Image: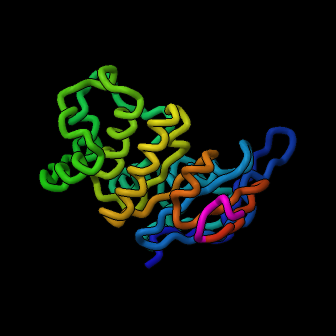
Amino acid sequence: MNIVKTVDLTKTYNSGVEVHALSNVNFEMEKGDLVAIIGDSGSGKSTLLHLLAGVDKPTSGDIFIQDKNITKFNKDEMTIFRRRNIGVVYQFFNLIPNINVRKNILLPLLLDNKKADDEYLKEILSILGIEGKLDRYPKQLSGGEQQRVAIARSLITRPAIILADEPTGNLDRKNSEEITGLFRLVNKRLNSTIMIITHDEKVANSCDKVYRMVDGRLNFLGDETYENY
């Protein structure tokens, strides 16, 4: 089952000179895929993620998430759809500093006036190893712990897809390895569909499929490991 599908996705910027950030990208992800997108800075990786997350609009082409063409949504429709169907994990965690871990995790549900599934929450906390952190505030956590909370928040709505933008880019090697392993564990335990934008070879190696973005064009490298390419 296709969770994500893009059709001739193109993004062009005009600032005196026309720049093709993405050029006719055709890309699919199925349920349970764990995919890495690698490439140099400025190659178009983050542009692709922003378009899939619905925070930017393509110049042309279509994006289907669970068979819904999100390019047709207005701003309010996209906000609601994103909150319910797309989990996003950022390099700098993006936790709210003046609310505790529990509320940070539950925020997408609170904004939707929905209650948490307590058993599912317990499962997420157990997988991520943050069961005892719920009453703490972000400033009381290490960088690795904050990223675990951010991953938990991205999972809480059982989204169709999780989009992770350089999730280990602000972490030391030990925490980077732990977070990489947790994405793999989440993928296997919850059958989550995950796309990771990364410069990190080890992160790419942990994924089932690897793509390289070059000058706005997406090339499939294979379904083994990045080191083989």
Reply yes or no: does residue 226 show up in magenta: yes
| Above or below, comparing residue 143 to residue 51 in the picture | above
Can the viewer see residue 113 in this picture? yes
Q: Residue at x 36, y 64 (%)?
A: 188
| Above or below, comparing residue 30 to residue 165 in the picture | below
Colour scheme of the picture:
rainbow
Query: What quarter of the picture does the C terminus occupy?
Result: bottom right
Q: Residue at x 76, y 56 (%)?
A: 214
Which quarter of the picture shows residue 26?
Answer: bottom right
Which quarter of the picture shows residue 159?
Answer: bottom left
Residue 166 at what x, y percent from top left?
Answer: 55, 43
Q: Which residue is drawn at 55% across and 65% down?
A: 63
Residue 17 at what x, y percent from top left?
Answer: 87, 43
| Above or below, comparing residue 45 to residue 29 in the picture | above
The magenta stretch is 223-229
Which of these two is toward me, 174 or 23?
174
